Image (spheres, grey):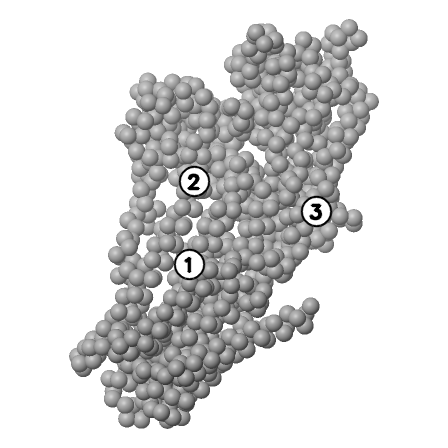
Amino acid sequence: MDELGTNPEGLSPDQVTAAQEKYGRNVLKEGKKKTPFQIFLGQFRDLLVIVLIAAAVISALTGDARSTLVILGVLVINAVLGTVQEVKAQKSLNALKQLSSPHVKVMRGGQKMEIDSAELVPGDIVIAEAGDMIAADGRIIENYSLQVNESSLTGESTNIDKKEQTLAKELSLADRVNMVYSGSLVTYGRAVICVTATGMNTEIGKIAALMNQAKERKTPLQKSLDQFSSHLAAGILVISAIVFGLQLYRGMDIMDALLFAVALAVAAIPEALGSIVTIVQAMGTQKMAREHAIIKNLSAVESLGSVSVICSDKTGTLTQNKMTVRELYIGGEVLSVQQIDLTQQLHRYLLYDAVLTNDSTLVDGKGIGDPTEYALLDMYQKIADSAFDHEHESLTAEDLRHILGRVGEVPFDSDRKLMSTKHLIHGVPTVFTKGAVDVLLERCDRIRFRDQEGSPFVCPITDADRQKILEQNQKFSERGLRVLAFSYKETEEELTLETENHFTFLGLVSEMDPPREESADAVRKAAEAGIRTVMITGDHKVTAQAIARKIGIFHEGDLAVTGMELDAMSEEELEDKVEKISVYARVSPENKIRIVKAWQKKGHIVSMTGDGVNDAPALKQADIGVAMGITGTEVSKDAASMILTDDNFATIIQAVANGRTVYENIRNAVLYLLSGNLSAIIAVIFASLAGMPVPFLAVQLLFINLVTDSLPALAIGMEPEHGAILRRKPRDPKARLMDKCFVRRMALQGGMIAAVVIAAYLQGLAISAEMACTMAFSTLTLARLLHGFNCRGTESLIKLGFRRNPYSLGAFAIGFVLVLLALFTGFGRSLFSVLPLSGFQFLTILILAAIPTLVIQIIRIIRERTRK
């Protein structure tokens, strides 16, 4: 600490600033990322683009400068669009990574505070507790049963017991038990640590080069689309080869035939598919982040749409997470907070217990730590403030902790459901313990009362006393109150797990965490969406049932079971009953995994919420693990797929709606691309088989590909969520993106567009082959632009509304202007080989192009009215 210029109070602001300038931010340098220019060049690596470049070279060699310029122009514009999309996606995902970065508790200038791990510097004093992620290398100063999992560094899966003493000789990393290392997880206990190295100077920083080799994995949807695209490309290349052969057979020049066949292939294959999927998913995750749900990986977006069961924690997620002490049970009577008297030793000892067996802190009225614990500190402060007059400042919880410092402790864990600390009270070694009522009561053999004069006395606890305490606990629980029990003992023996017994019972404290106002509505929406909500909590069964009933989770005929009752069930029995159980109380980490697995065996996609170390295994087991951003431990956040920045159950339901919307938008964008491309293929095959001139020139197909692919498809991907999305059943995860219904819609819509294009082509052919090309080209481009409105959803535009998606209007407007420039300017007509159109001919094109959209919209309106 001397070497780093620090002390137990932590660094001063000036020291922090100086250290940050010297050492930089506590982050690992990532591998070199592609620059926008490298991304731009990468757009030309596609096989079909290479073929097209070859075609441009061939056109130049044959003297067709116009085709060469158009091909190269289209390639550059497509590459620019692809680059912009990829850079946007990268920025979105980087922003999400920053949002989900770990936080750490530090002492700075004598003040305990929470900061972003990237702000840590050598010399910082860090308080690490069970559930935290170690964010920098450090030396242990104070140790309280700390256990750390260092498997990310050492490969050793077992937890390491840490010590604070000096080690005599140079040891391997795994044997340096007085040190902690960045990237490891605190699984038990707590410690005060002095940061010795940050960023690339940490042990994990030394192997950062290996981490930088890791590549982003594609999501299941992207893999599925890649596979589909490769099959589609093969099929279209075969069709292009056939068309090439037919054109040669009909006497077309070999270079013109080759250029046309290549252009057909490029126009038919949806090159924008991959980038559109990525950008839509990235934009979706950004929207979710703004709505308090951080998605850690893109595959979670896809899974969200299939969630059919949400196993939710109660405290903070379904409730307000604003615990306040309501009533206390001391000396056989129920008292309000205002009735607690510091001059009475029995009351004072219970307050000592509440403050000293407590790792939370109140800073400027804001709690840092567990809400149940800082509610106890808030209770103490109110009592202390009222006990002192205005002239004398009250004794704060931190003052009391400083005066009665810990000389030993056994931290809380979810299996014991207890926490014990040892102190010197008036020179007498005293152990204070708090925990679950039923667990602590079993370890008490005495009870403390006060006589009529108010003097305290201790006597053996009787069965009648136990019964009275349990009855009072039941009364509190039935009102939805959370109850903690408190006890103590005076002893010289060392405080260990084995010595947590023979306590004297002090009393009960009941706390209330009222349900969130939006919880009941969110549970109702989940039910409408076909999603079952199950409450899993460490609270008493009666308390859990009371809250679950208020929110709408527990109904008549539902079951509520405890962890012990669950342990007694066989796997077969649990599978039979799992769909009837709405509330699980007093559960262990193993219980949570069993519950998730039981639902998964029934074929459900399960989301699980959690905030503690003990929740991490179940969060990983669940299809969508959801960690709490405010109260959640770093271990739980690391294990989860999604982090709630507001710890609110309603946010999960909103995220599910967003997940469904993103998937639906991608599906609609794919439908738009494939149905439009199919129409071009049908028109070309029709003309080739009929022995007619080609309906499109190569440059026209390239224009169609540019104008009608990327922007309208992206606009469809930006379609906002609509109410109906949560009234549908969850999507079957095994269902293919392109099922029979999708293929049928694609074929019908593509066929309708092809029909009007062929009609325009035939009408133009009566004048000349050039006019046939002009009318077919114009009709296909406009019909596809209008078709973008159809693909926004399955409802009519009357129901969807035009204003809800301004992007679709913008994409249509840009496309329409470009078509007008191609048809009605000298440069455009020369570039794309189109003839001047009369007013009647242009009107004919507009009517024909609008027919598929009008037919689709009329059918949808009739269907909607029939349903009504």
553 relative to 831 in the view: left or right: right
Number of numbered labels in the structure image: 3
The mark found on residue 699 in the picture is none
Residue annotated with mark 2: 101
Q: Is residue 421 above or below residue 62?
A: above
- Calculate the distance from the C-alpha at mark 3 to the C-alpha at mark 1: 36 Å
Residue 547 lies, in percent from the top left, at: 71, 39
Image quarter (top left, top right, bottom left or bottom right) of the C terminus: bottom right
- Calculate the distance from the C-alpha at mark 1 to the C-alpha at mark 2: 22 Å
Residue 77 lies, in percent from the top left, at: 30, 65
Residue 252 lies, in percent from the top left, at: 28, 90
- Please say whether residue 694 is visible from this viewpoint: no
* Residue beneath the point at 54% across and 57% down: 721
Q: Earlier in the sequence, mark 3 or mark 2?
A: 2
Amino acid bearing label 1: Thr
Q: Earlier in the sequence, mark 1 or mark 2?
A: 2
* Residue beneath the point at 20% across and 80% down: 64
